[in-house]
Amino acid sequence: MRSELSGQRVKFVDPRFGQLAGQFFRLFERPSSGGGALAVYFGGEPVVDIWSGWAARDTRWQPETVSMSFSTGKGVASTVLHRLAERGLIEYDAPVAEYWPEFASAGKDAVTVRQLLTHQAGLHRVRGLVPGQLALLDHDSIVSALASATPDRRRLTTPGYHAVTFGSLVAELTTRATGSSFTDLVRTEIAEPLGIEEFWFQVPEGQRHRIAKLFPRINPFKVPWDTASYALARMPALRNIADAGMPEGFDKLVHNPSIHDYVMPGWNGVFTARALARMYAALANKGVVGEDRFLSEETLEQVGEVQTIARDYVLGIRMNWRLGYHSAFVAHRNQSPHAFGHYGLGGSGAFADPETGLALAFVTNRMGGALTPFVDLRLARLGAQAEAIARSL
């Protein structure tokens, strides 16, 4: 079923999830709220696929609209690796250097794939890693710099979120292990098995008109990006956040159309909510979505197991890292301890809850709240409502 009511558009809503749909539509009542899409699976089957609001100031969000979702893409990149691990092409406890020999330099010879996936490689620093505002577009320079870098010693006792570097590390590792480009791996390991093409880190030229415009800004507290990065880097309590996630000129780079020419899985992933929800549906439903097996139950047991409960030295909180995913944050004190996924800068994200069989994905072009673009509670509240419904069924 598909309908349109006052700019609110519906492909499908299971009546049991009607309250969730109503909560979503209230997020986008005016152009200043931007737009977004929400997709939910329950028991491996779709129950919600809706969208609303504005993809640009004068353009409504359409069913085919896609949105850059920043760190949400880390979950997709991790899932690529798990598909390869299931076939024995990568082993979680093998040294990264076994697949990528140059990585062994500067004392990283013992860093394992498992440690990389749980942000314990000690390579969180991106600020100053490579020179120039466009340097993040050069994958070869980034991975060369990371291979040569000395790891942070804190990695031996606690994780440190690799906010920008994680995607480059996973992309290079999977490419070295298989001989295939990361773009090809995303297509063959994720998009084609799931039957949905919108898993893009390098967006096809003919599809770029579908990308929603990000707004209003990425600058924290309306302070110029480089000024904020410089200031935070000199504050002991916030230095790690600046080092991990605030490289030079990043605020301008995210609005540069050329970023869609490159593969940067830590932050430039472009998706639909229905694509993300279908992937996480398999993770929530014992590896099966619809009638298709995507991952084995044995792999999922490892994927969903908490690897570290130590406080993350970059973020300052316990993320309960799994193998490439963190705990799902929902606005409810009784949130599921088994739910995991990955959220992104600005508010997009997706998660799976194997306990209830629920998978939810939310994408939006409205960056955060009034004060900061980094995070808000939209996804947390939608997740709480969806979890409450799932638990009642």
Image (tube, helix red, strand yellow):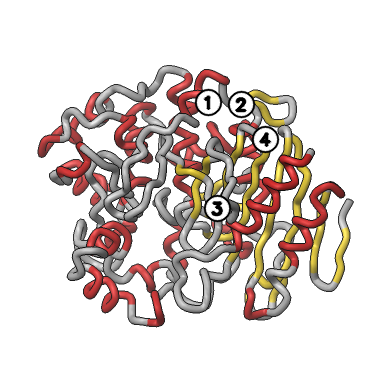
Q: Which residue is mark 4?
A: 356
Residue at 25% over, 59% down: 240
> How far from the left and from the top, in percent, is residue 42?
73, 38
Left or right, 69 with reference to 171: right
Q: CA distance from mark 2 to mark 3?
A: 20 Å
Q: CA distance from mark 2 to mark 1?
A: 7 Å
Q: Which residue is mark 2?
A: 287
Q: Please tell me whether mark 4 or mark 3 is closer to you in this view.
A: 4
Q: Amino acid at mark 4?
A: Thr
Mark found first going from the N terminus, 2 or 1:
2
Quadrant position of the C terminus in the picture: top right
Residue at 65% over, 47% down: 360
Residue that extends furthest to the left in the rendered view of this protein: 106
Q: Amino acid at mark 2?
A: Gly
Mark found first going from the N terminus, 4 or 1:
1
Residue at 80% over, 71% down: 7
Assess whether mark 1 and mark 2 are in contact (beta carbons under 8 angstroms).
yes
Left or right, 386 with reference to 243: right
Q: Which residue is mark 3?
A: 349
Mark found first going from the N terminus, 2 or 4:
2
Q: CA distance from mark 4 to mark 1?
A: 15 Å
Assess whether mark 4 and mark 2 are in contact (beta carbons under 8 angstroms).
no
Q: Quadrant of residue 129?
A: bottom left
Q: CA distance from mark 4 to mark 3?
A: 18 Å
Q: Which residue is mark 1?
A: 300
> How far from the left and from the top, in percent, is residue 169?
32, 42
Q: Please tell me whether mark 2 or mark 4 is closer to you in this view.
A: 4
Left or right, 361 with reference to 201: right
- Say which element carries label 4: loop
